[in-house]
Amino acid sequence: MNKFCKGMLAGTALLIAPFTQAAVIEWAYTVTTEWTSATFTNGGASANATENNTLISWGSASGDHTMLGQRAADSRSALEITNSTATGNVFTNDLTPEATNTITHFNNTLASSFDTLTDANLRTTLNLTPVNPVGPALPALMTDFTIDFIETNNFLACTFPSSSFCDDIFILQVGALTSSFNYEGVNYFVNIVELTGNLRLLPDRTCATAGVANGCFGFTTRENAFTPANFGFVITAAIPEPATLGVFGLGLLGLSIFGRRRQIKK
């Protein structure tokens, strides 16, 4: 992360602190991420699909999505959630994201005869309990996401920027990465962050290939590779002073580039 981002995040934390003396300082949490449904190219469920809370897989019935280099006729791809449920403690206004669940795309080359994933629904449930000061648990905070998935043709040249021949496309269509709640008169924000920098605004040509409007949000995945998206979150307390809201917004903007900066630093 460059000096500007460090200063922006640190400055935001300092501005928040004086106004949140009555806020909860530390929370115990559990985060569960699960698939709730999936649709395939035949308009429904695929005969060779596996669909449960943590895994959506498609392709050859005898294939193994965790094995690279299989023949296209014997191969299988998947989207798999790991580290769910995640548990731990998180501090209010600590702008270092707390790592939680991972979604990995196992992108194997498939024969054109197989049904492939077109869209899926994802649900994230966050449970919070104040531990400093101690207090009753909050009702579960639940967020639903709709995902468009594009299994590209691997025998034609890509019409969008691609690192392989040809990347698959994962679009986050519906779902808020920021939510809020009120606890004992204090407003809090929960911001979901993707830590590897894979989840980002995509080029216009990529959005067009996926059949969605410019400015779409998601990631692309190399053919014959496994691509993880590691998620985390932060909790911040609201600033009641209107004059400082703009600075607070800059702090949250810094979170959106946190993963990319970490990736570049490596």
Image (cartoon, rainbow, N blue to C red):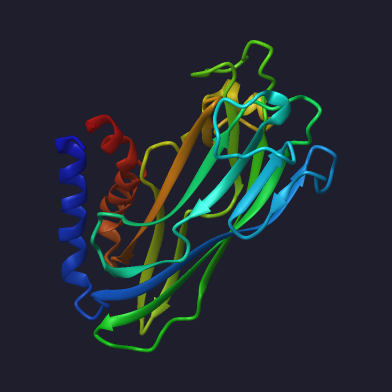
Inspect this view and state whether residue 36 appears.
yes
258 left or right, relative to 172: left
Find residue 30 and report its image quarter. bottom left
Q: Tell me if residue 75 comes above or below residue 155 in the rendering.
A: below
Residue at 58% x, 56% y: name it.
Answer: 54
Residue at 26% x, 51% y: name it.
Answer: 247
Find residue 127 and report its image quarter. bottom left
Find residue 113 and report its image quarter. top right
Q: Position of residue 48 (x, y in %)?
A: 78, 44
83 left or right, relative to 49: left
Q: How many marks?
A: 0
Residue at 63% x, 37% y: name it.
Answer: 77
Foreground residue, 17 or 126?
Answer: 126
Q: Position of residue 45 (x, y in %)?
A: 81, 48
Q: Tell me if residue 210 comes above or below residue 57 in the rendering.
A: above
Residue at 73% x, 36% y: name it.
Answer: 60
Q: Tell me if residue 23 comes above or below residue 236 in the rendering.
A: below
Inspect this view and state whether residue 216 appears.
no
Q: Residue furthest front?
A: 62
Q: Residue furthest top?
A: 157
241 left or right, relative to 225: left
